[in-house]
Amino acid sequence: MVNVVHDQRRRSTIQARHAKKWTDWETKRTAKKETAETVNWLTEIMCGLPEELRNTLALILDDATHEEATQVLGKE
């Protein structure tokens, strides 16, 4: 009887560990999919912008400050 209880506890622990790994994997997979969809959407939108605005937005999205973007684009 004691062995049965130990086996059940071990099985339960293993199942919990596998469930956590599956949850972690699924969360990462979903996040990657959402990121890819967002990038595709943004790329589509940016392609429709005038070149000057598209270049400015690209610099800002690349973490440049507005001041740095102005300097890079030569708009003093």
Image (cartoon, rainbow, N blue to C red):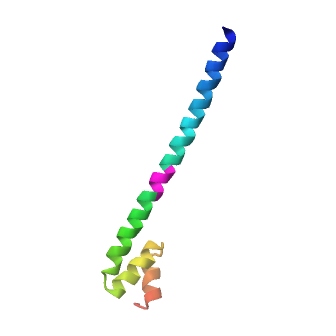
Image vertical order of residue 12 relative to residue 56, above or below: above
Residue farthest along the top direction in this orientation: 1
For the N terminus, the quadrant is top right
Residue 45 lies left or right of residue 19; in this view the side is left
Residue farthest along the right direction in this orientation: 3
- Report x, y in % for residue 40: 39, 69
Residue 4 lies left or right of residue 28; in this view the side is right
Q: Is residue 54 magenta?
A: no
Magenta stretch, residue numbers: 28-32
**Residue 67 lies in what quarter of the image?**
bottom left
**Residue 17 lies in what quarter of the image?**
top right
Name the residue: 65% across, 19% down: 7
- Relative depth, front residue between 64 and 53: 53
Name the residue: 47% across, 81% down: 68
- Relative depth, front residue between 5 and 74: 5
Name the residue: 69% across, 13% down: 3
- Report x, y in % for residue 20: 55, 38
Q: Main secondary structure of the magenta part?
A: helix
Numbered circles on residues, count = 0
Q: Is residue 29 magenta?
A: yes
Residue 32 lies left or right of residue 4; in this view the side is left
Image vertical order of residue 43 relative to residue 32, above or below: below
Image vertical order of residue 22 relative to residue 34, above or below: above
For the C terminus, the quadrant is bottom left
Name the residue: 67% across, 17% down: 6
